[in-house]
Image (cartoon, grey):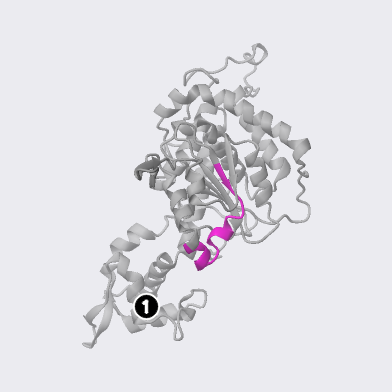
């Protein structure tokens, strides 16, 4: 990734004006620390941070001390994700943290170092088997699974096939109540093993779509001249991080019953809401600016990943290309397969021209559209000719579901240093 993620997205109507009041650790929601005596008569002074908000602020500062993060939203997301590991028992979904980078030396392993020293009950692995991992997961007190060099697990078809069980375990563990079954013991009894646990994975290149769809994605990038971070020395620096871990644990453990009942308003829906809900609950428990920061980060980062999927997801990109092909000739009711393929293969920025020896073929097009229930048929055209083709109304429902055209008000604003990757200027 070469450009920062957007910093100040718009929140949905009704989600940006009234957040839960500041919460005091160990007290019911809605209670707030009374203002200091000297602040009560000073309308211009800022209220002091609650203990909970201060813990998150200190964690945030430690992350920025050692790692050049891609955006302020990413720092917020990582801090909230780390805190959420200390209340895993309360969550219905265990969000993944995907720390990805286009190349080496982008800070992903350093970020994982900070995460390792601050999460709850860490379980570190590089190449453990699926069996070893699920036998290490305690259903009553799940560990936090940390996987470095995750790209080695899925970087090639052979590696991906070999580690398919690990991928399945990581996907299943996103939701509570998805155990894996194994036959064990001398009597060959079927035994359930829990899979539910929060997990952070760091690697070069994107992780499998099924994992990133369940993840808060942090897209690291190499530092430029002038971006300075402190060196990290285990013996010297881990005590301060471990102290924050202890403070997180002391703050959040008494709030289990409160957290399990919370259903916060979310700026996103569906799986993105499932993934981000624990982070937003943590922010609401902390109070202060954190509820606003959490929802801003959620909206900006999920919007950005949706844009990445539109540009990178093969089938989604095909649907977008077909919509453009129809629009280029005035959105006719029908379009011949021949004309459609010519338009797709002529797009130099699309992969279709290199999809085969002669570009995308009619059969290749049929196979890509088959999951959507769309196929070509004999069509009559305005000049009286007949040929294989597609009706525009075949795509309307699919476009609306999988690649809706962004509304102007909903489109993420480009960062100050330029547009997002893959967008037109």
Q: Which residues are magenta?
A: 145-161
Name the one closer to the observer, 97 or 176: 176
Q: Quadrant of the N terminus?
A: bottom right
Q: Nearer the viewer, residue 219 or 166?
A: 166
Question: Which residue is denoted by mark 1 in the rendering?
Answer: 364
Q: Is residue 346 left or right of residue 293?
A: left
- Counting from the top left corner in percent of width and height, residue 174 is at 44, 44
The percent coordinates of residue 256 (x first, y second) are 47, 25
Total label count? Answer: 1
Relative side of 365 to 33, left or right: left
Residue 10 in view of the camera = no
Residue drawn at point x = 62 percent, y = 14 percent: 40
Q: Is residue 201 left or right of residue 231?
A: left
Counting from the top left corner in percent of width and height, residue 319 is at 38, 68
- Residue 225's place in the image compared with 382, above or below, is above
Tell me which corner region of the image, top left, top right, bottom left or bottom right, holds residue 387: bottom left
Q: Residues within 10 Å of mark 1 (few under 14, many from 20)?
A: some
Q: Quadrant of the C terminus?
A: bottom right
Location of residue 365 in the rendering, given as x and y in whole percent from the top left corner:
36, 76
Residue in the image at 48% along x and 40% along y: 197
In the rendered image, the residue lying farthest to the front is: 186
Q: Is residue 33 above or below residue 62?
A: above
Q: Secondary structure at mark 1?
A: helix
Q: Is residue 156 magenta?
A: yes
- 420, above or below 331, in the image: above
Name the quadrant containing residue 318. Answer: bottom left
Q: Is residue 31 in view?
A: yes
Judge whether residue 227 is colored magenta: no
């Amino acid at each position: 990734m070469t450009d920062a993620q957007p910093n100040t997205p718009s929140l949905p109507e009704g989600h940006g004006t009234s957040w839960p009041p500041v919460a005091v650790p160990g007290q019911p929601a809605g209670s707030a620390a009374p203002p200091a005596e000297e602040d009560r008569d000073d309308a211009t002074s800022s209220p002091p941070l609650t203990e909970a908000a201060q813990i998150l602020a200190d964690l945030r500062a430690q992350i920025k001390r050692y790692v050049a993060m891609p955006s302020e939203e990413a720092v917020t997301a990582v801090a909230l994700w780390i805190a959420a590991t200390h209340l895993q028992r309360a969550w219905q979904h265990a969000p993944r943290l995907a720390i990805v980078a286009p190349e080496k030396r982008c800070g992903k392993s350093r970020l994982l170092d900070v995460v390792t020293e601050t999460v709850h009950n860490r379980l570190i692995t590089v190449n453990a088997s699926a069996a070893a991992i699920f036998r290490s997961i305690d259903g009553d007190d799940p560990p936090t699974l940390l996987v470095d060099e995750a790209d080695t697990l899925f970087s090639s078809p052979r590696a991906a096939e070999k580690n398919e069980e690990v991928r399945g375990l990581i996907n299943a563990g996103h939701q509570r109540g998805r155990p894996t079954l194994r036959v064990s013991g001398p009597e060959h009894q079927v035994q359930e093993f829990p899979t539910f646990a929060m997990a952070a994975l760091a690697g070069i290149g994107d992780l499998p779509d099924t994992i990133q769809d369940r993840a808060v994605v942090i897209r690291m990038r190499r530092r430029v001249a002038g971006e300075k971070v402190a060196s990290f020395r285990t013996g010297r620096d881990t005590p301060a991080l471990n102290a924050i871990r202890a403070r997180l644990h002391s703050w959040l453990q008494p709030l289990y019953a409160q957290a399990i009942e919370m259903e916060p308003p979310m700026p996103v829906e569906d799986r993105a809401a499932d993934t981000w809900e624990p982070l937003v609950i943590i922010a609401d428990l902390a109070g202060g600016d954190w509820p606003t920061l959490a929802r801003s980060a959620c909206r900006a980062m999920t919007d950005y990943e949706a844009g990445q999927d539109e540009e990178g997801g093969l089938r989604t990109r095909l649907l977008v290309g077909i919509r453009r092909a129809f629009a280029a000739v005035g959105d006719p009711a029908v379009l011949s397969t021949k004309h459609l393929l010519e338009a797709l293969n002529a797009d130099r920025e699309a992969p279709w021209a290199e999809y085969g020896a002669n570009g995308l073929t009619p059969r290749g097009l049929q196979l890509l559209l088959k999951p959507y229930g769309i196929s070509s048929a004999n069509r009559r055209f305005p000049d009286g000719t007949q040929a294989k083709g597609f009706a525009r109304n075949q795509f309307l429902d699919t476009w609306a579901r999988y690649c809706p055209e962004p509304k102007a008000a909903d489109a993420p604003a480009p960062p100050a240093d330029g547009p997002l990757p893959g967008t037109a200027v």
